[in-house]
Image (tube, helix red, strand yellow):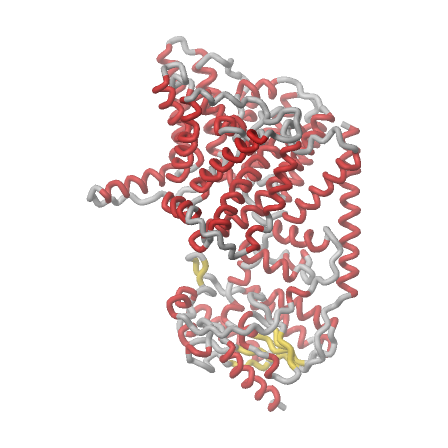
Amino acid sequence: MKKFIIKNCIFFSLLGVFFLGNYNLNRYFQSKHPVSLPQVDFLFLGDSHFERGINPSLIAKSANIAVQAEPYIATFHKLKLLLRQNPQIKTVLLSLSFSNLSELNEVEFFDSDFAQYIFRRYYPVWSLDDLNELKFDRQIYYSIFMRNMLLFPKKHHFSDFLGGFTEDRKTVDETKDKANLLKHFVRKGKALEVSKLSKAYLFKIVGLFKKNEAQLENLIVIIPPLHPKYLSSIPQNHLDSFNQTVKKLRESGVSVWDERALYGEDALFVDYDHLNSAGARLFSLEISKRLHSAP
Amino acid sequence: MLFNSYEYALFLPLVFALYWGIGGQKPILQNGFLLIASYVFYGWWDPRFLILIVISSLIDFYTGLRIHRSETPNERRAFLALSLAVNLGMLCYFKYANFFIENLNDALTTLGFTSHLSSLNLILPVGISFYTFQTMSYTIDVYKRRLEPTTEIFTFLVFVAYFPQLVAGPIERAIHLLPQFKKNRYFNSELASDGMKQILWGLFKKVVVADTCAIYANEIFNSYSQMTTPALLCGALYFSFQIYGDFSGYSDIAIGTSKLFGIDLMLNFKTPYFSRDIAEFWRRWHISLSTWFRDYVYIPLGGSKLGSIKNLRNVIIIFLVSGFWHGANWTFVAWGALNALYFIPLLLMKKHRTHTDTVAQGHSLPTLKEFFQILSTFSLCLLAWIFFRSPTLEDSFRYIQKLIEFNMRVDRMDLFKYLPFIGILVLWEWFTREKEHGLQLKKFPPLFRWATYYGLVWLICRFLFVQKTFIYFQF
């Protein structure tokens, strides 16, 4: 028995040393290779609504780092890290749509279809303490953490979560898109609630701006354009909660630009809740005009 | 609890320490720990279904004793019937009820009747096909007077619920397993070390081979209508290694784990893809199930002793039943029927016992004849796996139809990129085919052995949780 235990202890200790060495090297690389953003005045953050809808080449001195399906819990930690490493960021423009406050954002953490992608993107900015306040798939989180931090030294850890503008020339296809009209409010036949956690994190993001972290001067929340069919399909509880949130944001001194009903033509949308490249062009020019005319 | 989970990585050392530390060498304490551990292991998935295991165990314990004590054949038969009715009843209800309802509805509709039978909302209890078969073998053996029933209830409970093989086998026989729970067990360092290596090899087959093959197999089978012949062939190949890696990997982990507790489980896979004919394949694939059907269905039906027609009938029955055991779907029955079709010519020519040894024993390479025999047997298996993997019979036939269109265009090179890894596995298995598992590497220097172990651990960590569950859990 003694021999067996000693042999196994040696085997697993050597493995532990290997893992620990890689972990420390990866932590070192994370601190040595921070995310450096270009010198811009306007930073667009959020999910697919900005990823598809904001073309930064049409807005002077701007960068778009929105990425699809980004929940606010991720945006909060991402922004915190970016502000620490890029004190030049002065104005952040955050996308706020109905999908951002849906329970779907919480499902992403335990549904294996999503969790793989979410953890792969954000493992460098999340600690277990951050995640413990929500239900999440621990096996997937640990395996992704292990794969990226313990198995080999990796120089660049932050590349997946930066995102950026994605052009899509497709237009609304009623036969296909109609089936997905309620995708943010119903999943696998079950109605999704409003996510309290997502709301809390939205106000935590506002808190970053209020605390004036790293000289962040301005936070503008933008409600991106949505197709009239999408707007008319939103369940009442989601609509009420959303409008209350907007009201609360305004009361706390945040500028909210409500552009949800800006466009209605099929030709400007990829599907019922995302702009296509033509829509993105119009919307980006509109935002640019407003940004550069603002005092 | 899954073998490839973090919970199990904590659970196993804890049970091992308690078993040998507190349990010492007293069978009562050791069995007590194993029983608690087994119920925790099973209850981790859904504690409600523990009740089924307990019911099945208690009834078989009781009927075993009553069969033994009964003085009249009728009474003995009645208690055997009770045991079989409870076990098969549970199995049929949870596994096949919806299948029968759907088929009855279809049949009635075809005959012009309106059927109002609706499907039942049932969850299939994990491992039910395995533990019911294990407990039935106990009562049948007692009935046949091949085995004295045990009077120790906890020994019997742990025999049924023993966690390494509870949910996906090997399906053990009471004759082999039960006496091991009764005698003193002493720690054997060499056996435990070999167990650790077998667990590592099993994890490698499951996590690195099966789970990665599953990604490609799923993609190809889910969109087979858009695939060309090379991709479809590749899909069948991926699935054949997915199911082999998944199931034989599970068996290796189960057997390896059991070695840590000083308990021997039967071998379940013996490099089946190196078989020279389909009869040999069935002597090497899921051995515990094939021998179960041989001993408890084929032989009671008369086996080969009642003439060639009845023998043929019996062979067809066991292949069909074996297919149906895998799942409540006609695709599994077709898979069984196809295997019967492969087997029957060998039986008629009396060549089904030609290859009972390991191929190319003592040689590093097979002869050209052996090579082609292996290749043709594997091709037959590949064809049968299409039925096994497809969701419906119609899909299986369409898949095969697309496959034989011989459209040799290669649209997606990425679908082929895992094939070299399968090649490496095949080569490794070939050179260790006479061993119990792929990591019995005694003749190699320690440095090579340790480098191999570390390499495998690294690969397992790299591929962990691409896909989580074991295919055979659903059976």
* Residue pictured at 46% horizontal, 32% vertical: B129
* Residue pictured at 58% horizontal, 25% vertical: B266
Taking the image as shown, residue A78 lies to the left or right of residue B156, namely right
Q: With respect to residue A116, does B446 lie above or below?
A: above
Quadrant position of residue B37: top right
Residue that extends furthest to the front in the rendered view of this protein: B368
Q: With respect to residue A151, does A241 lie above or below?
A: below
Q: Which image quadrant: the N terminus of chain B?
A: top right
Residue B343: x percent and y percent? 43, 28
Q: Nearer the viewer, residue B447 or B77?
A: B447
Q: Nearer the viewer, residue B427 or B335?
A: B427
Q: Nearer the viewer, residue A22 or A201?
A: A22
Residue B451: x percent and y percent? 76, 40
Q: Nearer the viewer, residue A33 or B389?
A: B389
Residue A126: x percent and y percent? 67, 60
User: Residue B405, can we see it?
Assistant: yes
